[in-house]
Amino acid sequence: MIGDIADSLCRAACVEVDSDTEAVAGHGFKLGCISCKMRGEVSASATVDWFFKAKGESDFVQIYSYEDETATIMDERFDDRLYWNGSKKTTDLQDGSIFILNVTFNDTGVYRCFFERILTYNDYEFHTNATKFIHINVVAKATRGMASILSEVMMYVSIIGLQLWLVVEMVYCYRKIAAAGEEALRESAAPLPPLPKTAVCCFSLPCPPGAVALASTQALGALGCLGDTGLPRCYHRHFGLEQRL
């Protein structure tokens, strides 16, 4: 039981993707045809048959068959030009794609991929099938799809938008830095505020002429003078410190 669960988890996921529909003359082309099982843990075997209806014709003609890992080309128009490009080394086919070599304009038309699958359960077998149609147009030169063009346009628009955003950010940052520098220069060049008419200066007594002696304060332990004596200074008697007020 555990082994079966682990085996089912290890199987590759199957996704049904539509085939391309434009082939270029003289080049190879993959006819994609994928038919996934609904339950990957169920054992199964499948065969794949391909049919072709050329442009202007009314009936499909079988051109290819793949069964038991053996391929058979059934239309001489495709001799040595069809190769299996689907599931490998298994009879439990989910990818029934084939590859056309040296595409010609006569390969334009409708291709039909037919899956016939047998699901094997413990007590019985269940038969199921799936059919897919691919309309192929052969051109002389490859043309770009609208999705590719839009993707390229969006890529260039994104690049230009990012560059413009970077330029705006650089200008913004430069202006902020320049403004900050100018502000710093203005602050450094600003004149000192005028001194009060009556300034305190703490020199050793006696006070200079024109100054009034102040009483010693216990907090500063200093003698002071009051008067117009230039830049104020304070002398701390206990610590011998001198500083501007």
Image (tube, rainbow, N blue to C red):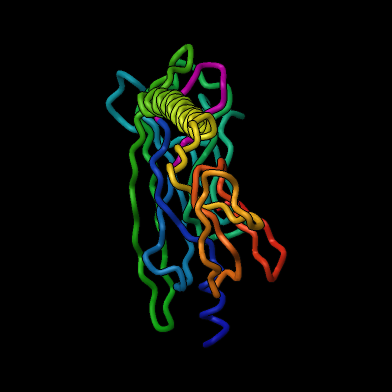
Q: Camera-side residue: 205 or 224?
A: 205
Picture residue at 53% right of the left edge, 29% below the top: 189
Instruction: Find residue 144 and report its image quarter.
Output: top left
Q: Camera-side residue: 54 or 167?
A: 167
Locate residue 101, reporting x and y percent. 58, 27
- In the image, taking residue 204 as reference, residue 182 lies left or right, namely left
Picture residue at 43% right of the left edge, 24% below the top: 164
Picture residue at 38% right of the left edge, 41% below the top: 18
Residue that extends furthest to the top in the rendered view of this protein: 140
9 drawn magenta: no
Residue 166 appears in the figure: no
- In the image, taking residue 56 as reference, residue 97 lies left or right, namely right
Q: Which residues are magenta?
A: 21-32
23 drawn magenta: yes
Residue that extends furthest to the right in the rendered view of this protein: 240
Q: How many marks?
A: 0
Picture residue at 46% right of the left edge, 23% below the top: 23
Instruction: Find residue 123 and report its image quarter.
Output: bottom left
Locate residue 74, reporting x and y percent. 50, 36
Residue that extends furthest to the left in the rendered view of this protein: 58
| Whether residue 35 is situated above or below residue 33 in the rendered picture | below
Instruction: Find residue 26 and report its image quarter.
Output: top right
Locate residue 77, reporting x and y percent. 51, 24
Locate residue 19, reporting x and y percent. 41, 37
